[in-house]
Image: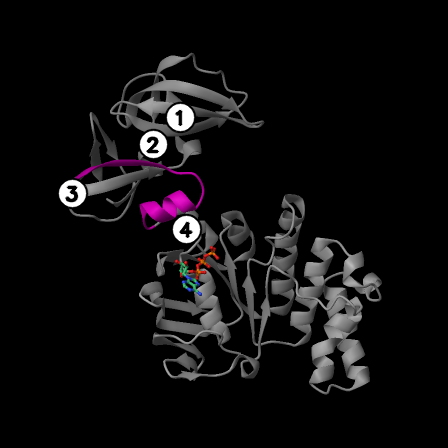
């Protein structure tokens, strides 16, 4: 098996560029999530990979084989790819087993082999006891499992999923994330998975490709994109991040209005506009002034169970979200000092 390579993919709708010179490699056997806000080009990319849309420029390859380029697109049915959508698209009059077996029958697979394949994938998605039910008698999560079983039964070389969990309620969605990850680990099919839900991407992906306006903003493991975001956009999109705009004075020191912050990591930007990113849980309440300690005002404290979220305004008007353990003493309303430890401050390019 070989992975997928997307090289300089550009897709336009009239004058609008939906995907803009996208470069992305999906390693063999990996699950890569395309993650980004609505309209950033995720679905268009997936459709191009499926062979449903022709690139205006660039190429899509699997190993050495060119699957798509302008004027030459291997048709979807010749790609050995299976696609799973948010609508499960099951045949309502067929049983679960019938739905899974249908495409195998069309392929001319013999009865005994087909039955064995259907039984095996239904076992994999834990639906063997429901093989004789029709889709209307299943929950949304179970219907989605049938769609997954049907895709796996085809033994695709590549699996494409477009927001596969977005029709499920929150509890089921969370459960299915782990289920998808388990199935991926069991089957190891190279998978491209579109979602706008960062928690879903973090839970399922080997690599997350964050997209912004048709381009790749960052590719990395879930840990990398969270801990070392490449830009303010990624830091904002992946988990809550405080971003303070300032000027890089050199040596990782950023002046933000009336105070300066030493940054322990980040881009080696030249002096000039810069952002400092810091996660809410990394900020601490300080007892006294010192390096990276910022005067602020507490505007609001919100109890969230295990933690309390403090909405603060730092000197210079910077809004800062701070999370502290709910068991910690609640600071009084008004002035307080916040320590933004250098090791938690990451300098990013200015916007
Ligand atoms: P969402 O999460 O909302 O599905 P997305 O990231 O998948 O968004 P795309 O559906 O790929 O984004 O759309 C990318 C851009 O292309 C958007 O600006 C969208 O409005 C535009 N677009 C998508 N399909 C068409 C179309 N058929 N005709 C014209 N413009 C389109």
Q: Which of pointers 3 and 1 indicates the residue nearer the eye?
A: 3
Q: Which quadrant of the frame does ligand 1 lie within? A: bottom left
Count of picture labels? 4
As for residue 256 lying within the magenta part, the answer is no
Residue 72's image quarter? bottom left
Indicate the position of residue 110 as horizontal and vertical percent values: 78, 87
Residue bearing the label numbered 1: 284
- Sequence-first tag of 2 and 1: 1
Residue bearing the label numbered 2: 341
- Inspect this view and state whether residue 64 appears: no
Q: CA distance from mark 3 to mark 2?
A: 22 Å
Q: Which of pointers 3 and 2 indicates the residue nearer the eye?
A: 3
User: Element type at marker 1?
Assistant: strand
Q: Do tag 2 and tag 4 residues touch (Cβ < 8 Å)?
A: no
Q: Which mark is residue 272?
A: 3
Q: Nearer the viewer, residue 156 or 215?
A: 215
Indicate the position of residue 298 as horizontal and vertical percent values: 39, 18
- Sequence-first tag of 4 and 1: 4
| Up/down of 8 relative to 300, above or below | below
Pointer 1: residues within 10 angstroms few (<14), some, or many (20+)? some
Magenta span of residues: 230-248
Q: Which of pointers 2 and 4 indicates the residue nearer the eye?
A: 4
Left or right: residue 342 versus residue 238 is left
């Amino acid at each position: 098996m070989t992975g997928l390579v997307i090289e300089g993919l550009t897709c336009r709708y009239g004058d609008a560029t939906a995907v803009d010179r996208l470069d992305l490699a999906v390693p063999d056997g990996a699950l890569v999530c395309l993650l980004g806000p609505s309209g950033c080009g995720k679905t268009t990319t997936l459709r191009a990979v499926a062979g449903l849309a022709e690139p205006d420029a660039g190429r899509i390859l699997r190993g050495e084989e060119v699957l798509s380029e302008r004027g030459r697109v291997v048709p979807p049915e010749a790609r050995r790819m299976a696609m799973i959508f948010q609508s499960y698209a099951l045949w309502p009059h067929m049983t679960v087993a019938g739905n899974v077996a249908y495409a195998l029958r069309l392929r001319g697979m013999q009865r005994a082999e087909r039955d064995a394949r259907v039984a095996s994938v239904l076992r994999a998605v834990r639906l063997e006891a429901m093989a004789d039910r029709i889709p209307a008698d299943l929950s949304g999560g179970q219907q989605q499992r049938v769609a997954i079983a049907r895709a796996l039964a085809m033994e695709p070389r590549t699996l494409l999923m477009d927001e596969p969990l977005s029709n499920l309620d929150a509890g089921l969605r969370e459960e299915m994330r782990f289920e998808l990850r388990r199935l991926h680990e069991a089957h190891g099919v190279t998978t491209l998975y579109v979602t706008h839900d960062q928690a879903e991407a973090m839970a399922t992906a080997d690599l997350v490709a964050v997209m912004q306006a048709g381009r790749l903003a960052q590719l990395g493991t879930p840990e990398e994109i969270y801990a070392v975001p490449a830009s303010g956009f990624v830091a904002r999109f992946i988990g809550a991040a405080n971003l303070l705009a300032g000027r890089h004075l050199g040596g990782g020191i950023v002046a933000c209005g009336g105070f300066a912050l030493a940054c322990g990591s980040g881009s080696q930007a030249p002096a000039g506009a810069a952002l400092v990113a810091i996660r809410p849980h990394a900020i601490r309440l300080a007892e006294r002034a010192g390096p990276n300690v910022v005067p602020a005002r507490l505007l609001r404290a919100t109890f969230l169970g295990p933690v309390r979220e403090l909405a603060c305004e730092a000197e210079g008007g910077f809004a800062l979200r701070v999370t502290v353990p709910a068991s910690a003493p609640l600071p009084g309303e008004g002035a307080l000092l916040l320590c933004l430890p250098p090791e938690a401050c990451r300098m990013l390019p200015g916007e």
